[in-house]
Image (cartoon, rainbow, N blue to C red):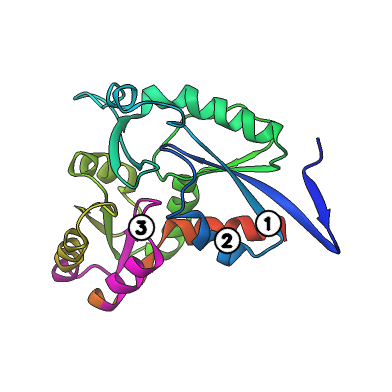
Amino acid sequence: METWKERGARVVRKVGAITIGQSPRVDVVPEMKEILGENIEIIEGGALDGLTQEEIAALAPGPEDYVLVTRLRDGSSVRIAERYIVPRMQTQIDKLVAEGAEIIVLLCTGEFPNFSSSKLILKPQVILHHFTSGIATGRRLGVIVPDKDQVEQARARWAGVGEVLRVEAASPYGPREEIWRAASSLKEWQAEVIVLDCIGFNLQMKREVNQHTGVPVILPRTVLARTLQELLS
C-alpha cells in the first residue's frame, strides 16, 4: 500500500497517531496539525477504542503498576495500568501501518517497551527526555505530571537531567486551578525550566504557566510535531 497520495499538486504524507485512550484526540491532534501543515495527514487509533466503561475500569492500575493517565472520547480522564494496554497499542500500530502510515507516533509521554513495526515509531518520552537534557543541564528542572501516583515514577525518569529536580502533580484533564497551584509551587522553588509531562497539556496551558512563572516551558505535543516536521519535510 502506498504511504502517500497526491491531491492535485500536493503530496500528502500519512502519520499514524496512537493514543493510550480513545481516538480521535480532538484535544491534541488539531494543535499538532497547525505545526505540521496541510501536507501531513494524521490517522488515529486508540488502545481503548471499542471498550465499554466496565472493560476500561478493569484496566485500572494496582499498587505496583506503572500508572498512565489518558482521555476518553467523551472528554473524561481515566487511570490505567501500562501492562494492560501494550498489546492493544501493538494492534493499533499494525492497523495504522496497514492503512498507509509511514511513521507512527505515540500520543503519550509515558515509558513503553519496544513495539514491532517496519515503520519508525516515535516515543515522546524519549524525544522529550533528550530535548530537555540539552536545555536543562545545570538548571533547576520542574516537572508537572497528571497524577500524584506518577510523581515517584517521574522522579526516577527525570533524575539527573537538571542540576536539581522537583515534580508536581496536576492533571490537564482536571480543574485548571491544579495547574496554577503546581506552577506556583515551582515558581516558589525557583525552577528555571518546566516540563509539562503529559501529551494532554495544551498550548494555552503552556503560555499561562510561562506567564505565571517567567521561565521556559516545554510542551510535549509541539516538540513531537516539530520532530515529525523535520522527518517528513
Residue 82 occupies which quadrant of the picture? top left
Q: Does 46 sit left or right of 35 as displayed?
A: left
Residue 33 is tagged as 2
Instruction: Specify which label sits upstream in the sequence, 2 or 1.
Output: 2
From the top left corner, tell me how far across and down residue 112 is, in percent.
44, 33
* Magenta region, residue range: 187-211
Residue farthest toward the right in the current orientation of the protein: 9
Type of amino acid at the residue the image marks with label 3: Phe
Instruction: Specify which label sits upstream in the sequence, 2 or 3.
Output: 2
Q: Is residue 19 magenta?
A: no
Residue 231 occupies which quadrant of the picture? bottom right
Residue 40 is tagged as 1
Q: Does 204 sit left or right of 174 as displayed?
A: right
> Mark 1: few, some, or many residues within 10 Å (few <14, many ≥20)?
some
> Which is nearer the eye, 163 or 232?
232
Type of amino acid at the residue the image marks with label 2: Lys
From the top left corner, tell me how far across and down residue 219 is, in percent.
41, 61
Residue 79 occupies which quadrant of the picture? top left
> Mark 2: few, some, or many residues within 10 Å (few <14, many ≥20)?
some
The residue depicted at 35 percent of the width and 44 percent of the height is 74
From the top left corner, tell me how far across and down residue 102 is, in percent.
71, 42
Residue 63 is tagged as none
